[in-house]
Amino acid sequence: MPRLPPEAKTHIDEAGLIFGDDFNDSYFSRDNGLEESRAVFLKGCGLPHAWSDKSSFVIGELGFGTGLNVLAVWDAWRKSHPKDAILHIVTIEGFLLAAELAKAAHTAWPELQDLSDKLIANWPVHAYGAQRIWFHEEAICITLLIGPCVEMLKNMAFQADCWFLDGFSPARNPDMWSEAVFAQIARLSAPRARLATYSVAGRVKTGLTTVGFDISKEPGFGTKRQRLEARLNRPPSPEIQRPTTAMIIGGGIAGCSLASALMKRGLKVDLFDSDPCAATKASGNPIALVKPRLDRADTAEGRFFRAAFLFARRIYGSLGAAFEETGVLEIGTDPLSKERLANLGDDPPLPADYLLQGENASLIHKKGGLAYPHAVLASLKQGAIGRPVCVARIAHENGQWRAFDERGVCVANADICVLANGPGIAQFTDMGPYLRGRAGQLSWASFAGGAPFMPVTGGAYAAPFHDQLVFGATFDPCDLRDAPPPVSVASHLENYDKLAGLAPDLARQIDVKTASGRTSIRVTTPDHLPIVGAVPQADPGLYVLTGLGSRGFTTAFLCAEIIASQACREPSPVETAIAKALSPDRFARRAAKRSHSKVHQ
Ligand code: SAM
């Protein structure tokens, strides 16, 4: 299977409407797509009334298509959404349309022009997996699942308050209306979820009834005689309160990304950091390279790194000069890495506006670039209450998390507590044994060439920064209890050797004897994936984000989004396999499995 999802095959028919060639059906009603959307889906799900008393409302949609239903919902939401509420739309698409086609389709409804412009400017990337797209000012969050319908549903976790079933007609598009799809819809529904569709085909009625929906036929739209409304017949469960306050321990890229993700959801955030000037953290480096780690195999890890990069790019898009889209050239430096890059170039997992094959088996990450950590952190934590305090102890009392300083004084109370203090999580949890330390020295020296060039990477990396060439970094095992080692000439020379292997032309333009640098400690894990989620066997509301290694400025945003979504009981931004691969309980799970298989040998 190619690494890129299939493209939609379409043409514009004689009525000027977009038509799906593979399914021999049109994307929306010939009578008026927008009116159909309102009459079938919004009315069918009781919107906008159904969201009138909700602080968070989740719509599931099968068939994102041109995004017209999304625009219709968005239009209703902007006119009537409850104060401080967030609308989540989780929508599936196996054959993503090009943005220009969707844009052309929207032109029939000038009243939606402004919303269409926003959606088109943030159009999903043509790549497999879940992509989260925030429209923060409008309090709308879209999670687009690109891939085959039933597989994507099986691999997600959310509770929809209502569903729009908008595949092509059941006779022409049976995969969207299968028993397996209906079973997933029931699994992913809130107890009294509503559902609407234009189809009253027998298989739809039977499929929905079998999985527990009560159905009713209503007068249809346009030339269609009838449409379907349904409601899941499952007893309601008590609503769990969303948290309103959070304390975050650690103010590096992990903590600041969390602060931003939680504030976006209206939480009041206390951000604790005993080293607010980032003197010791990797987040204090002058630059950070941002590029995806691309894998050949389609694994949860590979999907995580790709999704994290796509999400990071969306966040950087809102951080102004804190990020520069320079592009990044990835070079193979040994036969294995050359082969890997050649293979990825031949069959890329990202579209051509993101990834191009370069010369000599290299890859050009067109949307990669440089993040400026100081500016990134400052921007992310705006609005959080900065606390330059060393938290010595935390405790869960009367449903609240409390933080105490070294004198035993309680310095904060919050509904949830997130540990984002790198190796320091060992102080508050028993997860210390799963952490590994790597001391990294970054070097820089005056650069005779001076002219900007595209940053290069391949094991090590080199990038321009003002009139300096930044290169490195070392990655030496170290004890996490130790302070970062002092900057050393030996490490400058090691970095220089790597630079000479990676980009000999650049190496020739600096004098390593004049190099300066900085060391910091990176926290990694045995499987090189971050630790993201609820702390196992702890009281509720305690989360951890650590182990970002040397990729924090690419991965922290999605990790923070996973935790914020879990804490606020919102749809997951990632596939379940990814959440599981990052989950803090994975090490204990694996250990239990190992000892179980030993016993049974
Ligand atoms: N709601 C859309 C809109 O507002 O424009 C129209 C949806 S169109 C009728 C049906 C969509 O389902 C198409 O975009 C099609 O590519 C998608 N689709 C069809 N089969 C699919 C499958 N097996 N998995 C995922 N998506 C599929």
Image (cartoon, helix red, strand yellow):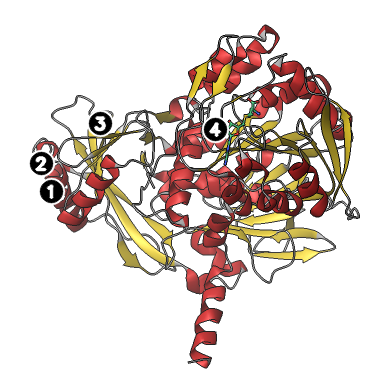
Q: Foreground: 37 or 423? A: 37
**What percent of the width, then of the height, locates residue 12?**
52, 14
Q: Residue at x 18, y 26 (%)?
A: 450
Q: On the image, numbered disc 1 is attached to which residue?
A: 501
Locate residue 427, reporting x and y percent.
58, 68
SS type, badge 1: helix
Of callouts 2 and 4, the N-terminal one: 4
The yes-or-no answer for disc 4 within 8 Å of ligand 1 is: no
For the residues labelled 3 and 2, the Cα–Cα distance comes to 14 Å
Name the residue that disc number 2 marks. 504
10 Å crowding of disc 4: few (<14), some (14-19), many (20+): some
Mark 2 is surrounded, within 10 Å at the Cα level, by few (under 14), some (14 to 19) or many (20 or more) other residues, namely few
How many angstroms separate mark 1 from mark 2 (CA)?
A: 6 Å
Which residue is pictured at 48% across the width and 35% down the height? Answer: 376
Query: Whole-Å distance between the Cαs marked 2 and 4?
Result: 36 Å
Q: In the structure shown, which secondary structural element does the residue marked by tag 2 occupy? A: helix
Question: Sequence-wise, which precedes: disc 3 or disc 1?
Answer: 3
Left or right? Give the position of 213 relative to 141. right
- Amino acid marked by disc 1: Gly
**Mark 4 lies on residue:** 379
Q: Is 249 drawn above or below residue 86 in the view shown? A: below
Dot 3 and dot 1 residues touching (CB under 8 Å):
no
Other-residue count near label 1 (Cα within 10 Å), few / some / many at <14 / 14–19 / ≥20: some
Q: Is residue 155 above or below residue 130?
A: below
Judging by the rendered image, the residue that carries numbered circle 3 is 454
If you read the primary sequence from the N terminus, does the residue marked by circle 4 or circle 3 appear first?
A: 4
The type of residue carrying mark 3 is Met
State how far apart marks 4 and 1 are (Cα): 36 Å
Tell which circle, 3 or 2, labels the residue nearer the N-terminal end: 3
Q: Is residue 573 visible?
A: yes
User: Is there CB contact under 8 Å for labels 1 and 2?
Assistant: yes
